[in-house]
Amino acid sequence: MLVMTQRLHKKRALVTASAQGIGEAIARAYASEGADVLATDINSEVLQGLDTVEGIRTRTLDATDEKAIGELVTAEGPFDVLVNCAGVVHHGSVLTCTESEWDQAFNLNVKSMYLTIRACVPGMQSLGGGSIVNISSICAHRGLPNRFAYSASKAAVIGLTKSVAADFVSENIRCNAICPGTVQSPSLEGRINAFDDPEAARKAFIARQPMGRLGLASEIAAVAVHLGSDESVFTSGIQINADGGMSI
Ligand SMILES: NC(=O)c1ccc[n+]([C@@H]2O[C@H](COP(=O)([O-])OP(=O)(O)OC[C@H]3O[C@@H](n4cnc5c(N)ncnc54)[C@H](O)[C@@H]3O)[C@@H](O)[C@H]2O)c1
């Protein structure tokens, strides 16, 4: 349940990959906390579902397109908060991961963050500060089967986050990461249904969390609200594991 407390009052926030799943939940939570949200996604059709939500405007954006990111930030920025949510999961080990899958994983899961952060930081400097929230994964810390390219790329997000935090800590620009466990989302449903026995796969995904359930996108959004808002103003360069106890 979302509690309306205006913790992001008047903050201008850019959220990538927010048509569905965790990104959508973050866009909605930010708007309900008083932010002026620019929700973006490569999928214009699904993104349109947010057009009627008060506090949210939508723009189609491929988070790997440097030119489009530059144009969007010039037209719509500066932003107080940037949430990098774009990401893709490839199934497989080092032996089955193709070079193309490896490149796709790093392009979307890591390089997109480099591009958006580089585009948004000058605006944050002009505002006197800002907050960057990067969605990593518990796979950055825990070796899970068949998550080779995903784990490597999400671990890179932690290094990227700490590097950005170090470079701009004296300018009041914070950069933190969230590491979700397994979260109910459209793409998770796709991954489950890709198994020969989807019900067994669902049970296995649930069993990974000691809490015995999947996470909700709104539970990740709650952490993103904390990190985006001034209540976390003394916090930079960390990752918060919201993972149903996977990292206990
Ligand atoms: N769902 C989970 O269990 C889980 C766990 C840990 C981390 N994550 C991370 O959370 C983020 C969101 O995952 P999810 O499962 O909630 O959402 P999802 O995978 O269901 O949706 C992803 C969204 O990204 C968009 N997208 C894909 N390519 C894009 C691009 N090039 N530019 C812009 N948008 C693009 C899609 O259109 C879609 O709306 C990802 O970074 C994912 O790795 C998810």
Image (cartoon, rainbow, N blue to C red):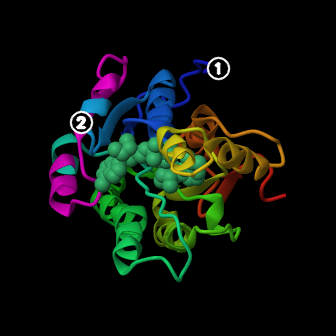
> How many C-alpha atoms fall within 10 Å of the one at disc 2: few (<14), some, or many (≥20)?
some
Q: Which mark is residue 127?
A: none
Asked whether residue 81 appears in the rendered view, the answer is: no
Q: Which residue is mark 2?
A: 44
Q: Is there a contact, CB below 8 Å, between mark 1 and mark 2?
A: no
Image side of residue 215 versus residue 84, left or right? right
* Depicted 35 relative to depicted 213: above or below: above
Range shown magenta: 48-72
Q: Is residue 120 left or right of residue 11?
A: left
Query: Where in the figure is residue 71, as x and y percent of width and height?
Result: 14, 51
Residue at (77, 55) in percent of width and height = 246
Q: Residue at x 63, y 35 (%)?
A: 216
Q: Amino acid at mark 2?
A: Ser
Q: Is residue 105 visible?
A: yes
Query: Badge 1 is on which residue?
Result: 1
Which quadrant is home to the C terminus?
bottom right
Toward the viewer: 117 or 168?
A: 117
- From the viewer's perspective, tell me whether residue 18 is left or right of residue 21: left
- Of badges 1 and 2, nearer the viewer stands 2
Circle 2 sits in a helix, a strand or a loop, which is it? helix
| Element class at badge 1 | loop
Residue at (41%, 29%) from the top-left corner? Answer: 10
Residue 112, image x, y percentages: 34, 62
Image coords of residue 176 (percent x, y): 56, 57
Of callouts 1 and 2, the N-terminal one: 1
Residue 14 on the magenta span: no
Picture layout, residue 12 above or below residue 236: above
Quadrant where the N terminus is found in the figure: top right
**Residue drawn at point x = 51 percent, y = 28 percent:** 29
Closer to the camera, 191 or 5? 191
